[in-house]
Amino acid sequence: MDGSELRTNTYLIRPNYQHKFRVGVVEKCIREIQREQLSGVQYVSEEIPSLSLSLANSIKNRLKELGFNRYKLVVQVVIGEQRGEGMKETKYLFLPCRMAARCFWDADTDSYAKDIYVNDSLFCVAAAFGIYYY
């Protein structure tokens, strides 16, 4: 380096407000993709692994387009057969469908969003985690 170049530090301890992981925006994105790809789909056990992967990749790619710079995005999709075994909607969630996650993260910068899709044949729980990369 001859001194004519000046390099700036890109180390950021917190994301800018416009680049922060916004749960409402991410939930809406997940919901739209689930509706697009799962509307009218019947549960066929042989097709579920590829469908889950396709859905997770679609969600991750759409989230990247939203510009969450410096965020590591992790998307988890679970699809199961709807057999009418008490999968009913309550005010806040669908029972008995439950998905748990434990994470070590910074509550100021990191977050997650999730959405549940249910039709007569299947249910899908999709969660997207945004972890800020320091």
Image (cartoon, grey):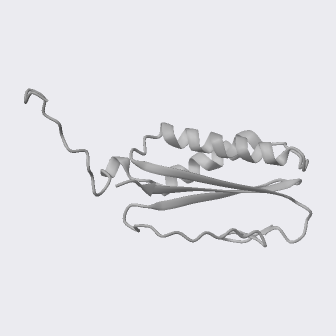
For the C terminus, the image quarter is bottom left
State left or right for residue 64 relative to residue 6: right
Task: Tell me which residue sits at (41%, 68%) in the image.
Answer: 107
Tell me where residue 126 sits by quadrant.
bottom right
| 70 over 132 or under it: above or below | above
- The mark total stands at 0
Whole-percent x and y of residue 19? 37, 47
Name the residue nearer the viewer: 100 or 121.
100
Whole-percent x and y of residue 28? 57, 49
| 75 over 5 or under it: above or below | below
Task: Tell me which residue sits at (58%, 46%) in the image.
Answer: 29
Whole-percent x and y of residue 72? 47, 51
Whole-percent x and y of residue 84? 91, 65
Task: Tell me which residue sits at (39%, 44%) in the image.
Answer: 69
Is residue 35 at all visible to an observer of this figure? no
State left or right for residue 123 relative to residue 6: right
Please identify the residue farthest to the left as the structure is shown: 3
Is residue 64 at all visible to an observer of this figure? yes
For the N terminus, the image quarter is top left
Name the residue nearer the viewer: 48 or 123.
48
Task: Tell me which residue sits at (92%, 63%) in the image.
Answer: 83
Name the residue nearer the viewer: 93 or 19.
19
Name the residue nearer the viewer: 75 or 25.
75
Please identify the residue farthest to the front as the structure is shown: 1
